[in-house]
Amino acid sequence: MKARRKIIAKVFISGLVIFISLYFLQKLLIPKYATEIVEGAMIAEYYQEEKDHDVIFIGDCEVYENFSPQVLWDDFGINSYIRGSAQQLIWQSYYILEDTLRHETPKVVIFNVQSMQFDRPDKEAYNRMTIDGMEWSLAKTGAIKASMTEKESYLDYIFPILRYHSRWNEITHEDWEYLFDTPGVSHNGYYMRVDTRAAENVPEGKPLADYRFGDVDYEYLDRLTKLCKVNNIELILIKAPSLYPYWYKQWEEQIEKYAEENGLLYINFLELTEETGLNFDTDTYDGGLHMNLSGAEKITKYLGEILMEETDLKDRRGEEALVARWKEKDKRYEADREKQYEALGNESIDAETEDNDEEPVMATEPAKDNEDIEEDLGYKGYAFIYHDVVIEIDADAASILEELGEANSYFEAASCAFNGLDKMYTYSSFELDTYPVDDKDYVSMVLFKDDSIATAEGVSIGDPAEKVTEIYGEDAAKENGMLVYQKDGMKLCFIVENGSISSIEYQTTVLDE
């Protein structure tokens, strides 16, 4: 009997040791998001808060970088929290609200509509930054199932060590320092930036074959609307004043119609620049994508006035315990502001982009005659040839840009798929975009702007649609209303309107992976 008890004890102890070891390894290997890519820590921060918020924001970077809960409290006595995350998709916003309702029922929910443009799972990295921080519940399992890409495994979300076991060579002092406790990276979900970079050369939106939001977007917007109504929550739709990514008028019309049909308040801050006092020379830190502290505080004050006028929210600055809580938050808010200003010193953030301030040089238009192009030039996929410069998708962009010469205009934005900057170079008749990998830029897209240029095979904007099938064949795929020919890991895409070609675009497939 004693021997049997000893065996059971040994098995139990061994199992406990294995469990503790695996738990420790998992905690070590999971990214901490403490000092780099801090957006990944924001979802989890919510659970450390007292749960009596009047207003909950849900959405992507257009909420957590553009609105300040501290201002809503200081100026209006509104207790709010931003449950935002990078590239938060609408179904993720829905499940995050479901998760929030496990803890509290706010009077108002504010949803940013930018994510309506995405109707399918995007990138695992962004899924992780939203989902890993959620507490386990039916809401989290729903978010996982709705968000997983084809290459992801549900089991990897249950046991993150299965996904992150290969991070051994990436472990830094941060992983040890924040093994069990990650420092706060936001202010009630707001990500503060005080630096300034004016909005310049912001590109217009490229033509789309279909501007209608996807069925899955409307499905989750309906579910979001119903969830709020069932819980007696006022849902407010907003479009933050970010100039990029582009917000199409066709998208605006759909949101306006939906809001009207469902009795919802919709606020488009892109149309309220004068009323809010926004100045895109001084109120943005990244060229118009997101507001800096100055811009965020301006539009938050405007939003606060609307909330107090249009909803049943009350000023809670008479509640002693809440006042004390926000007093402590304000200390950290001010300390963060001063620390960032101190780090900035007297140097202008514009110095980082001074190389792009030279006078643009106009490129000469190439001839449209492609009869001299050889059958086989040895390039990869479908290449665009401009003044004898062969532009291949996924090619190292440095030499190509050097051969093309100075662009007419240049714009850069934080990459949604890679660490680094997506860059857009606009020439007189086309746009060339790049994506970053390991400190190098690679060609991601070439977009035709007019009919003065042609593909290497001789197709231009304005040509009849039949010319495309004559040259490229009948086996085109249809994606988002476009005719798509794929070859050697890249795409050549055509939009057809009224029987003729209205848009031509070369694309990488790397961003689809």
Image (cartoon, helix red, strand yellow):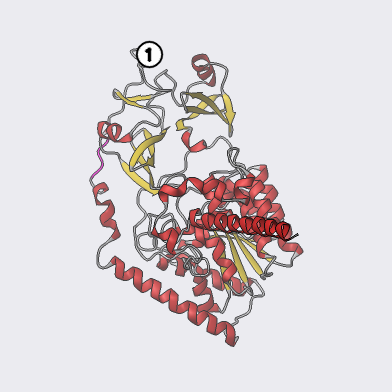
**420, 163: nearer the viewer:** 163
**97, 360: nearer the viewer:** 97
Residue 297 belongs to magenta span: no
Residue shown at 70%/48% (left/top)? 219
Residue indicated by mark 1: 376
Q: Residue 140: horizontal and vertical position, in percent?
A: 65, 55
Which type of secondary structure does the marked residue at label 1 adopt? loop
In the drawing, does residue 136 fall left or right of residue 249?
right
Residue shown at 47%/39% (left/top)? 206
How many numbered dots are placed on residues in this image? Answer: 1
Q: Residue 153: horizontal and vertical position, in percent?
A: 61, 43
- Where is residue 297, by image quadrant? bottom left
Circle 1: residue type? Asp
What residue range appears in magenta?
359-363
Q: Residue 73: horizontal and vertical position, in percent?
A: 53, 77
**84, 139: nearer the viewer:** 139
In the drawing, does residue 452 fall left or right of residue 44?
left
Whether residue 267 is visible: yes
Quarter of the image with the N terminus is: bottom right
Q: Mark 1 packing: few (<14 Cα in 10 Å), some, or many (20+)?
A: few
Q: Residue 486: horizontal and vertical position, in percent?
A: 50, 24
In the drawing, does residue 352 fall left or right of residue 511?
left
**313, 223: nearer the viewer:** 223
The residue at the far front in this view is 2
Whether residue 271 is visible: no
Asked if residue 327 is positioned above or below residue 147 in the image, the reply reads below
Q: Main secondary structure of the magenta part?
A: loop
Asked if residue 457 is positioned above or below residue 194 in the image, the reply reads above
Residue shown at 64%/42% (left/top)? 214
